[in-house]
Amino acid sequence: MSAGWKPFLRDHGGLVALAVLLVFNILVTPNFLQMQTLFVNISQVATIAIVAIGMTLVIATGGIDLSVGAIMALAGALAPLIFLSDFGVAYPMLGVAAAITLPLLAALACGLFNGLLVAGLKVQPIIATLILFISGRGIAQVLTNGNLQTFSNPSFSYLGTGRILGLPFQGWLALAIACILWWVMTRTTFGRTVLAIGGNERAAELSGGPVVRVKIGVYMICGLLAGMAGLIVVAINSASDAARNGSLMELDAIAAAVVGGALLQGGRAPVFGAILGAVIIQLVKYTLLANGVADEVALIAKAVIILAAVYVQQARRE
Amino acid sequence: MTALDTDAFDLRRHISRNPQSVAVWIALAALIAFGVLRYDNFGGAYNIASFLNYNSMFIVISVGMCFVIMTGGIDLSVGSVAAFTSVIAAYLSPYGIAVALPGAVLAGVAFGAINAFCIIALRIPPFIATLATMLGAKGGALVISGAQTISVDWESDFTRMGMEQAFGILPWSIVVVGVVVIALWVVLEKTSLGRTVLAIGGGEDASVLMGLKVNRATAFVYLLSGGCAGLAGVILASGFGAGQPLEGIGWELSAIASVVVGGTLLTGGLGSVPATVAGALLLGLVFNILNFENGRGTISFSAYWQMVIRGAFLFAVILFQARVTGGRRGKAAG
Amino acid sequence: MTDLLKMTAIDKAFAGVSALSGASLDIAPGEVHALIGQNGAGKSTLIKILTGVYRCDGGTILFDGHESAIATPREAQAAGIATIYQELTLVPLRSVTENVTMGYEPKRLGVLIDWKRAHRRTREILARFGIDIDVRAPLGSYSTAIQQLVAIARAVSLDAKLVIMDEPTSSLDASEVAVLFGVVRGLREAGVSVLYVSHFLDELFEICDRVTTMRDGRTVDCRAIAGTTKLDLIAGMLGRDAGEIEEEGRTEFGGGTGAAATGEPLLTARGVSTGPRLIDFDMTLHRGEIVGLGGLLGAGRTEAARAIFGVDRLTAGRIEMKGQGVAMDTPATAIRAGLGYLTEDRKAEGIVPDMSVRENLTLALLPRLTKRGRIDRARERALVEKYIDALGIKTADMEQPIRELSGGNQQKVLLARWLAIEPDILILDEPTRGVDVGAKREIQTIIRDCVAKGVGVVLISSEFEEIVEGADRIVVLNEGRIVAELTNPGITETALVRALAHIPESKTSGTRTPEGTGAAA
């Protein structure tokens, strides 16, 4: 085993950082150990974590998905349209069910679009997902005519405000998703192929792996998860603002994934790391806010964390 | 084939070697022709001047981005840095353009230096390093401006750059950008530094083994990109009369799109300054034409539709690129 | 006469594995000095230490009278050492002129490159090699042979005191080699030293003065070329008795008359073409047989392998297995049909560096290890253990990341990947390249055992002795076409060299491949 604190820090930097943050907050920040604080934090983290998990998978293949924010907006815009429509009002239960499944299908379709461009036409992921980044939010706004949609629909709002065992539904959802995808990554051919693609795509192809299908698959999963996150945000706010839903989420998701251990060149998919990364970033933000530091400075802090996390990982690999 | 023949500019050979750059110029010419024919005032002095004035910012950022991409890297921070430097420029505006311009550009170069340091010394991948700088610059802009737009000093000559025209014809902004772009074109085509930039993208290990000053060239492109963002920030502040800490969102992606449309390979090693300029102009023109089409009242393109159309346009370009450059894209010789 | 270069007692280890231990090299001014040794003997490592790519762990280097402080390739060039590396290290997207003059472009006003003069200079330099091409075209649009000559031209034009040539003739035909030798002699007359590394031993007798032999990371001999024989040199490289070698052969393939074991035909390629690099390729492979693909670098051997394995699309011809036409459209199809392909470049196409030995080993076997998408871990582990044992793979445990293993062990893992699918046909592209001497012998033995069990092998190797001793038949390629076929008892090194040299004289007028396709080995 490794001797000394340096290697330990390298291998478990994320957990150490988390521990430090928790201790600091317990000691310094007022009201930190309250249920309300925990609830608020989990609420905010969960959406980022869900998207970050999807992003981790895409990054594991050596790609990137800039369209997640736009997909969130699109899914979030579709849902109220459905359960607020005549059909939705007439059949409330069906309406809510449709309002959840149809936007998710749309999100899957977006992921399919991205996947086809990247795997089929061999377009660079940055450029391929840029298309939806630019136009996806626009489509959402066209559909809603730029209007803010507010509503009151307790069944739907459960997604964002429901509680299980006293903790937010979306937190449990994020954990469940992480468990499922962790299992997929470590126990299935799909997962193994994802890592092989990121590690050495040529080798994966030459070994007969279903590279094209798997690549399309990860973009679809990422799209789906972004869609879920979009629905959750709308549920939390009981309002869908296509202009703001998921704004800058791609950056947050990438940051969380990277802080959680994902390597941009691919080959690693630390699924729980994505949650950890999201938590760390959220905690730092909260720590600063709760102690009176301006929001803007939190941005700078986020930047420094990302640099530090990546630097530590680079050192670890060499 | 004698020696003299092979040195002369061969149009056919140029076309076969750079099909995409040529296509961009053709598309640009076609769009311009379309606009002139279809809309009154499209070719008028006012439209041209305001178009060039506004797009000068994107042109200069795109050229800076082109250099970075040619080395195989990327710079996501340009938008935020432009916002930051626009605030700096606004604060320096009382001292006139002679102080505000270099000051803001230097601020941009400073961010470029941070990028270069992270990428070269800390060996952090460019995507991450510039992502971090983007966040840092965004936060920094908000901090130094107190999250408000900062009005410029109207008394000084600062706003002349963004609002007045050189010799009454061309806006100062495009003149300055034009000079910078031409200088960079010369640097790329005619200096060792420029050729090294291209070589790095085409093969970094080979460049090191050939004894090229790879680190120096890499640092240069990031400093340059920061400086270009700085210049864009000055134009932004002087054109709108205020430093704007919240602007610049998505600019880096527009720049990347311009570079790609112009035929530069995202994987590096191949690129052209004029084609990038053409790409930026083309993207800007699409917007301009949409505005005119709205003005005609036949169809109404809301702002949202415009986003969709821009995305569709990029999609079309990508399809075209996939067809045309099929075998050449990003593959190094084995 | 003081030495130009004196390297003494050089040690170098990579991740704990020793690559050099007590290596040395002395070169006099104005001397053409040969450096020979098997793959894995340490020649490339020694050169890379000299040119600043690596730093040595121990030993001294004296260059031109003082201790060498060379720490980067740029400093090596500044000190007067020009190098042509074994792997093509130029930039294919850039023009020929740029590649030749990069870093040393003629300038006006000290800063602006004078392209007219640069083009002219490049043409002059290339004319010395008998090349007349459009220097403004991208380097990658030319054949491998031209690219190699351009690399050599660049090194020679750098006004160096020592020019290092690592396998400079691997893609050149006889006339191009003659031109190169003329250039080398010219260098010697001008007082420039040349360090010449080549496995074509006959070349050394033509132009070299002295020869240093390396084996297992050490320098074992340094003598004048005159008065030694090829067999002596080979014996030195292998560390065996000359007589023994004559009898038993140089590789683990040697011994016996190599009588072709012809079982049923497994695979037939008829008139296969895949674009400009492979044209009208015919070959039949039988059970228990080794067919060698011979040819220079860039001849189309790897293209033939890729065509058979479904990597490249056929533009003409067909592939038949057991009499039936098969559409080999993807590697997955080929694997299902019973083929395996050990690629030439394990770093680029073979290993997944961060994955474990276990995961790398089973990469091609996943469809057979999974039930409804789930990997059967117990079966996987048992299988991996079996192969680690059978092939003697030295690893701490099967979970070790493969990048931590030595080159030879990595290659064994890759070989196991293909053996694990129990193929009928194995395509091996440079199976012992970059592998230490011990592992090399082991790999050759494994291959021999495979063949004995009835596997049909297509063998590509630039080491003559491997192909000559291993193959039952050799198909010789040049520029994508078959130019000769050798069968036992006619397979000898002389016959192979002669077949390779039998190439039309039209090579030096700028053979080009259509632009847009990169060069391949």
Image: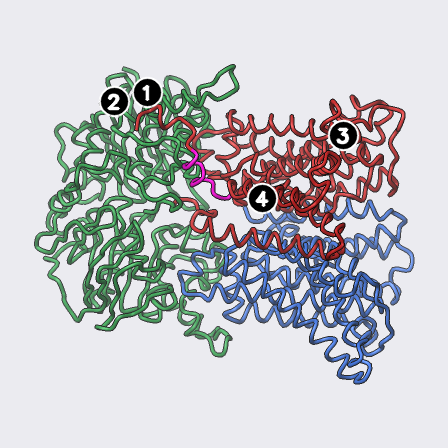
Chain colours: A blue, B red, C green
Mark 1 sits on what residue? C4
- Residue situated in front as seen by the camera: A101 or C449: A101
Mark 4 sits on what residue? B30
Badge number at residue B104: 3
Q: Residue type at mark 4?
A: Ala
Residue C414 location in percent, x, y?
Answer: 37, 59
**From what the image shows, is residue B286 above or below residue C456?**
above
Disc 1 to disc 3: CB gap under 8 Å = no
Disc 3 to disc 4: CB gap under 8 Å = no
Kindly identify the residue that appears in the image at 82 percent across and 29 percent down: B159
Residue stretch rendered in magenta on the structure: B11-20
Mark 3 crowd level (few <14, some 14–19, many ≥20, 10 Å Cα): many
The answer to whether C275 appears left or right of A29 in the picture is left
Q: Quadrant of the N terminus of chain B?
A: top left
Marks 2 and 3, Cα distance to the nearest angstrom?
A: 59 Å
Label 2 lies in what chain?
A: C
Label 3 lies in what chain?
A: B
Q: Secondary structure at mark 3?
A: helix
Q: Secondary structure at mark 2?
A: loop
Sequence order check, earlier mark of 3 and 4: 4
Q: Residue type at mark 2?
A: Glu
Kindly identify the residue that appears in the image at 21 percent across and 33 percent down: C177
Q: Is residue C359 magenta?
A: no
Mark 2 crowd level (few <14, some 14–19, many ≥20, 10 Å Cα): many
Mark 2 sits on what residue? C31
Q: Residue type at mark 1?
A: Leu
Mark 1 crowd level (few <14, some 14–19, many ≥20, 10 Å Cα): many
Q: Secondary structure at mark 4?
A: helix
- Magenta segment, principal secondary structure? helix
Residue C187 location in percent, x, y?
Answer: 27, 21
